[in-house]
Image: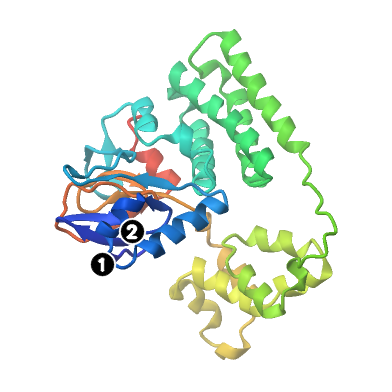
Amino acid sequence: METSSRGNVYVKIDGRWVIATLGYDLDTDNAAQVVAGNSRDIKSQANQLQQINQRAVYINIDNRTGYQPDLPILRNIQGIGRQRKTNESISTVLQKLNFEEYALQFREFAYCCEFYRLLVKHKLHRLSGTVQKHVFGVLELMTNAAISMELFIPPLKHTLTEVLDSMTDNENAMIGSKSLRRKHHDLISNCLVRISRFQYTQREDDGKLCLLDLPKECLISIMKKLDQPRDIVNVALTCSTLEVIAMDNEVWESMCLYHFNDKAMSDYISHIEYYSVDWLDVFKFCSKKMKVFKRIYGDDLVVCDNCRGVFWRVVGHDCLNKEEAPSHTLLTPSDFLDLLNL
């Protein structure tokens, strides 16, 4: 059994690497064939994921044909590093990676939201009528999903705002008739209005524990999971209790260590005793040099280091190179956009 750098657990079956956990539900009769003695653990994990309405991917194992998953993957990637490119059309790429389906899933929502924002902002004039229809149709579905789940409202609002601005600024460069462009413009405008008017459902007083009932240590631990400084600031604006937690030195130390390397911070803290460092000041100092902060997504697109296929990290893929231990390289939404044939 091997564990990847991002936490996926793999087992080797008949010379093939198979993801054993993280959202996978194995057939009950065949689970014992995958990991002897651990089938109950795998089944239990899959059931827990289903109970919290997260996506469970089903893998079928046939005794006669072996491991034959039907998982989304994009192959035939040429080049390495920033020179990676695909000769597939963007319509084919989005279809092979099931973007229309995964954009509505909890794990992949934020990644797809950022990708569509970058796609429209930088490549709108290159998109065919078919791709435009796909993008704007999916953004409408994502709006419905976000309102229904009451999640991802701020990032989706940001995406819709930039998409609408790009459509307005580049209307004459868009492919399609004037009436079709107006139809797409009205669609996104309507989605933006719905998101802007959205109000969260107020929780009823049910007597159960809420966030503020947790001890300070737990609240700090939760706050340290946030990867964007604006999220911490927004939490601080909710109430005085969370404001104190959000300004805790430990929270901003975690934020600095995640976004900045030692070289970036050394100019500020090299002459200060570590225990007396004000990490909020360090963050303010270092952030002046940063244009873009790192982002954490529930799931990302990655490229396999063995077979060079692009796939969803958590969903996994059927690697063509069965003998090598699983290894992959992260593709940010910007990296994935650069990989496309546009």
Above or below residue 239? Residue 312 is above
Image quadrant holding the N terminus, namely: bottom left
For the residues bearing labels 1 and 2, Cβ distance under 8 angstroms: yes
Image quadrant holding the C terminus, namely: top left
Look at the numbered disc 1 and give the secondary structure of its residue: loop
Front residue of 302 and 289 = 302
Above or below residue 330? Residue 175 is above
Crowd class of label 2 (few under 14; some 14 to 19; many from 20; radius 10 Å) = many
Which residue is farthest front?
A: 29
Instruction: Check residue 20 in the rendering and tell me which mark sits there, or answer none.
Output: 2
Residue occupying the point 53% across, 58% down = 293
Look at the numbered disc 2 and give the secondary structure of its residue: loop
Residue type at the position of mark 2: Ala
In the rendered structure, the answer to whether residue 305 lies left or right of residue 269 reads left
Residue 291 rendering spot, x and y as whole percentages = 53, 55
Which picture quadrant has residue 131? top left
Residue 40 rendering spot, x and y as whole percentages = 39, 63
Please give the residue where the numbered disc 1 appears in the rendered image.
1
Front residue of 264 and 157 = 157
Q: CA distance from mark 1 to mark 2?
A: 9 Å
Residue occupying the point 71% across, 70% down = 246
Which residue is farthest right?
A: 205
